[in-house]
Image (spheres, coloured by chain):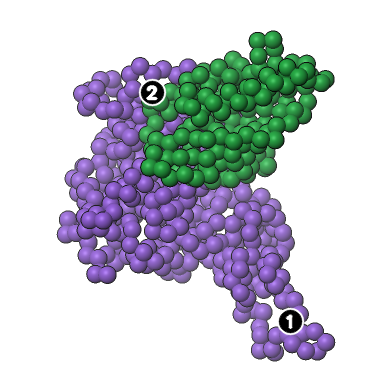
Amino acid sequence: MTPLIWPSEGVTRAPYRVLADPEIYAEEQQKIFRGPTWHYLCLDAELPEPGTFRTTHIGETPVIATRDKDGSIHGLVNRCSHKGALVCVESSGKSNQLTCLYHAWSYDLQGNLCGVPFHRGVNGQGGMPETFKFSDHGLERLRVETYCGLVFGTFSKEVEALEPYLGPLMTAHLRRVFHKPVEVLGYYHQSLQNNWKLYMENSRDPYHATILHAFYATFKLNRLTMDGGITLEHDGWHSMNFSMGATLKEGGEYDSAGLRNVVEDVGLAGPELLKRTQEFEDGITVAIQSMFPTCVNQQIYNTLAIRQLTPQGPKRCELHWTVFGYKDDTPELRQMRLTQANLIGPAGYVSIDDGVIGEYVQRGIGGTGMDDSAVMEMGGSAVESCRGSRATEATLRGFWTGYRALMGL
Amino acid sequence: MNLTESQRRQIEDLQARYIRLIDDDRIEEWPELFTDYCLYRITTRENFSKGLALGLMECQGQGMLADRVTGLRKINVYEPHRYSHQISGLVVESFDGETAVCRSNYLVIRTMADGDMSIFSAGVYLDKIALDPDGARFEERIVVADSRRIDTLLVIPL
């Protein structure tokens, strides 16, 4: 296939071919997922004691996060060094040793090979040669760092430490949310029939949020006419869009835009759904923070969640939601979070719409779409933070800035 | 306490009406199968078996059921589709004279507007069914889906 040349307009364009081409997808696995980037693995709170582990993926690579006896956390590739089978098949568990089911090669919590059945042979015959060294055959190890209770891993030896990678604005927002011990309330998993980047654009896109998501606009939960803004970091690789619910101005652009999104004759028959409390002093009611490439930290009122996306081929990906509250939540606040969870996840009044919209793009760009590009000129061509207006696509341009840098496109 | 034959038929009739109202696209009538202060929750085996309280849908009371109907009729964006429910293995586990605790299997086949068909969800209904002379209604229906994963989205109740 002809090499891809990025349109001369720069990041106000994104060629649709990067959303479907298997060769480009394979290159992303190398240059992005095994490149100089940090990837969310799990919450520190999900590894509560020595021997606990969780499995996940970085790109398509299966990964285990383990809690060692000394409390440290290790990231290991979940692939037996013998024949390549998964070592841990459960999503989480507890064991002082990780043992492959195939031939029972076993590893300690740091990934060191510590057992090979019959390695000295049977009745003096067979077995491993003298040259076989256990120390050469451990599980592949990742660099792992934890920030505010979020565990990240990377394959890269070159990438800077996690905190400077995320930058001061992103880490400040993480400290805002993860300021005390969290408690996992549950999980959602959602398969999306679209390229992974379509979801990562969607989570960064403040322009669509109040148009596609009629629930927001109908119940005046999030409108572009509220105070809010976008914050970009690391040349826009990471970004956050936020709104402040107490600042809604009535009328104006929404009423004159003729949007389908304000459904007039609707009221909630169960208004307790929207019973909520202002738990953050800064007045932010909705904040969606996207950390390059595939991690989202979400606050929608009192629902808090980490969303992690794993690609599964050029046209499919899976979204994993870890929904949490705080350990010291009152029973009322905990119930409020569980009730408001109706807004999020695969069945969420707000997020249902995102389930299908990426698929509509994926289907729309087939055929001649492979020679065409998306247009992202809302807010001009700048890739910078903006306070006040969220009628901008600067956050998407930031994502593509990071993508181009890593892919050399 | 043992159920009478007619009480047993009331329960079976409730189960059948539940799938008729959803599968025949009469979803506006679906909340009427529940008591005023009901609980309807869809969760996954992953959350349920770990004792995690999070649901995919969490409706407390008929009003919140009605809001789910409003959501799918008027608010949310999704590709048109319909369900075919298959229900089997109904067992009444206990009955205290007013409420029957029941358990049954469900299977939902989803058909999209373009003809694509798939097994969308399979799992268990854990029910508390209020029985009175007027008929049977759900006090509680906990839907525990065997798969932890939803394909694309969940907008029509299971």
Mark 1 to mark 2 CA distance (whole Å): 67 Å
The chain under label 2 reads: A
- Secondary element under disc 2, as helix, strand or loop, is loop
Tell me which residue sits at (16%, 59%) in the image.
A8
- Quarter in which the C terminus of chain B is drawn: top right
Q: Quadrant of the N terminus of chain B?
A: top right
Neighbor class of circle 1 (other Cα within 10 Å; few <14, some 14-19, many 20+) is few
Which residue shows up at 69% across the image and 58% down it?
Answer: A51
Q: Amino acid at mark 2?
A: Phe
Q: Nearer the viewer, residue A284 or A198?
A: A198
Which chain letter goes with mark 1? A
Label the purple chain with its letter.
A
Residue A125 placement (x, y as % from top left): 78, 89
Q: Position of residue A76 (x, y in %)?
A: 58, 65
**Is there one chain holding both mark 1 and mark 2?**
yes
Q: Nearer the viewer, residue A325 or A323?
A: A323
Q: Mark 1 or 2 closer to N-term? A: 1
Q: Which residue is mark 2?
A: A219
Residue A313 visible, this angle: yes
Among the chains, which one is green? B
